Amino acid sequence: MTNIEWESRKLIERALSLDATDIHLHPNERNTSLLFRLQGKLHHMQSLKKRDSERLIAHFKFRAGMDIGEQRRPQDGSFMLKNTSPPVNLRFSTIPAYFRESLSIRLLPQNNFFPLSSLSYSPAVTSLFYRLLTYRNGMIILTGPTGSGKTTTLYAFMNALKQADNSRIISIEDPVEIRNEKVIQTEINEKAGLTFTEMLKASMRHDPDALMVGEIRGHDTAYHAIRAAYTGHLVFTTMHAGSPYGAIKRLIDFGFSPLDLQETILCITSQFLMARYCPLCKSNECSPYCGKHGMSSRIALFDILAEKELKNAITKKTSPILTFSHEDQWKRGIALGLFSEKMKIKEVCYDV
């Protein structure tokens, strides 16, 4: 094993030991900053010499099938690290920065499936999620900022549905993040003409019971997703919106009538992750090296629109009332000792 191979392996192992989700090599004028994203926050780990960082980037680009000599254009690549437990899929992205090339690595542990019951500590939320899986058709839409756990929630829904009913599930992802042999997973390739819209139309002819659409990005994808929900399929998907009401507004802007949305949408959620209160560090700003409670565990808080409140929100018959709100779960979390009263809950702006 060469020195650069050993260094790259130790870097990945160090990130995995801290449960990092991303590694960044951030170029500065005189050196390169090594950053880990731990539980949603960036932590500066060390500074690397320019020569050492350039060798690391070249090595990773080579292993990921990228062009080592090309530093003027963005590139993407990936490879599977199989000598870890569980195996880890590494996704690489480079962009040309002012000083030098910047590299980002997303770490995606495989077989890391969360049970549906672990998504929330609120029994009411968990009960609603399980009840949604009993429907034979309809659409469940997840919203929230990047890194808020939407994909994890999608996988939890798919696994729970597969275990409960042995349903035939087809997922359309960009890209496939966690491999699951129980689900037919397809991957978007826009260069080859495999868009979300094209894959949705093809999947409808493949006899699915449920469809997972990684993201609704425009009218065409939304149209075919709603059509699938109309024709007897359970559809799980995500949208970029600031709240459940923002998702409704986007769909209406796409040209769908309130009747279309009432007939197809079962639930819209907005989620973000909150760190548990650490009794050892006496703060929510816990050290990344704390191996006990600290920042190593986060809980999802949900804003959920479902059933009567959802239909009222679509038709705007009442003011926004959530089935389960961030605030309700927050107060319960404080009572259970999961959060400190000093921790501030994120404000949610409803765009109605």
Image (tube, rainbow, N blue to C red):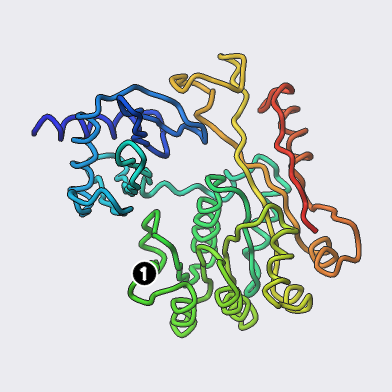
| Identity of the residue furthest to the right in this view | 318
Q: Is residue 265 above or below residue 156?
A: below
Q: Which residue is mark 1?
A: 189
Place of residue 99 in the rendered image (x, y in percent of width and height, measured from the top left) = 33, 36
Q: Is residue 198 above or below residue 71?
A: below
* Left-right relation of 81 to 157: left
Q: Residue 318, can we see it? A: yes
Q: Residue at x 18, y 49 (%)?
A: 68
The N terminus lies in quadrant: top left
Place of residue 333 in the rendered image (x, y in percent of width and height, measured from the top left) = 71, 32
Place of residue 83 in the rendered image (x, y in percent of width and height, measured from the top left) = 22, 41
Q: Is residue 200 above or below residue 165?
A: below
The C terminus lies in quadrant: bottom right
Camera-nearest residue between 152 and 2 = 2
Dot 1 amino acid type = Asn
Camera-nearest residue between 179 and 220 = 220
Q: Residue at x 79, y 40 (%)?
A: 328
Label 1's element?
Answer: loop
Q: Residue 16, can we see it? A: no
Quadrant of the rendered image containing residue 282: top right
Category of crowding for the residue at label 1, using alpha-carbon neighbours closer than 10 angstroms: few (below 14), some (14–19), many (at least 20):
some
Quadrant of the rendered image containing residue 31: top left
Place of residue 267 in the rendered image (x, y in percent of width and height, measured from the top left) = 70, 62
